[in-house]
Image: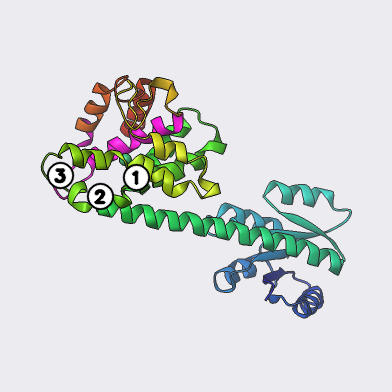
Amino acid sequence: MKGRVLLVDDEKTVCEVLKIQLVEEGYNVEVACDGKDAWDKIPDFQPDVIVSDVMMPIMTGIQLCKKIKETHETRFIPIVIMTTLTDRAKRYEALEVGADEFLNKPVDTVEMFTRLRALIRMRRLIDDLEDSKNIIRMLANSIAAKDGYTGKHVERVARYSLDLAKKSGVPEEDWNTIEMGALLHDIGKIGVPESVLLKPAALTKEEYDVIKRHPDVGVEICQPLNFLKDVLKVIHYHHERYDGGGYPKGLKGEDIPLEARIVSIADAYDAMTSDRPYRKGMPKEKAVEILTEGRGTQWDAHLVDQFIEIIIEQY
Ligand SMILES: [Fe+2]
């Protein structure tokens, strides 16, 4: 099957003709008579692409497109809007609400097949990327569980890190690196025995040395994955200290990549406020106090100040 196409038009004959052509070409087709009918059919049919007319009763193609692009679950479904060649205003309106492609009416079948192939290919790539992110989330959560976290520690670290990235003016194209880095920063702990990770007493020097290897091990694990190449710096440097006393490299100040300085604050805060098998999480006021004491020594002072503002205002 080449893909699932949801056809939306109030003119029955248009739908029927297009449907026959698409089915012959190997597509699975569902038909809707207006925007509202199409919206109702999305959950069951799960279209790979929607081809919609503009002028329809109850809900127009523009309204349908806007609703789809504004809804989290449906925002990646590509939409092709069918208009007459002369209707420029409608095209601009459709572009404004996120339409992906246009087809002139009457529809040229060859052009339609070409556009659908490209859009469905793009849709599948986005699905693959989303799947990879979900696998990363699962993996990261299972490592956090091994480290004694019961809730969604890495998800929280990712959220705090993104909040801090946005507040401190990190450009949007770097947000994904920060989110992935926050999820994966401790992946190297996969090789550290639980008897060490969860030891209730003080660690011996040898045990501490094992723990201190986790940033390097994390880099070794993620290095072969091309889509994680920018994330390696977060994994590698999330235990560096601003005063140079951290590990593994002893980097100092702004030599520590910004993304790692951000995740390190978010991670420390969540580690302090979370319950672990050997101790209870501390109240947020106490954690804020410790972050304040570590301004400029353990962490970047400016980032700590911005992070504390986030915690006070939003959490
Ligand atoms: Fe770590």
Asked if disc 2 and disc 3 are in contact, CB closer than 8 Å, the reply is no
Asked if disc 2 and disc 1 are in contact, CB closer than 8 Å, the reply is yes
Q: Which residue is mark 2?
A: 147
Q: Identify the magenta region.
A: 258-285
Residue 288: x %, y % from top left: 25, 29
The relative height of residue 265 versus residue 281 in the rendered view (above or below) is above
Numbered circle sitting on residue 221? none
Residue found at x 49% / y 41%: 177
**Quarter of image, res 293:** top left
Between residues 137 and 218, which one lies in front from this camera angle?
Answer: 218
Residue found at x 50% / y 39%: 175
**Quarter of image, res 267:** top left
Residue 84 belongs to the span the image colors magenta: no
Residue 286: x %, y % from top left: 19, 31
Q: Which residue is mark 3?
A: 280
Q: Which residue is mark 1?
A: 186
Q: Secondary structure at mark 3?
A: loop
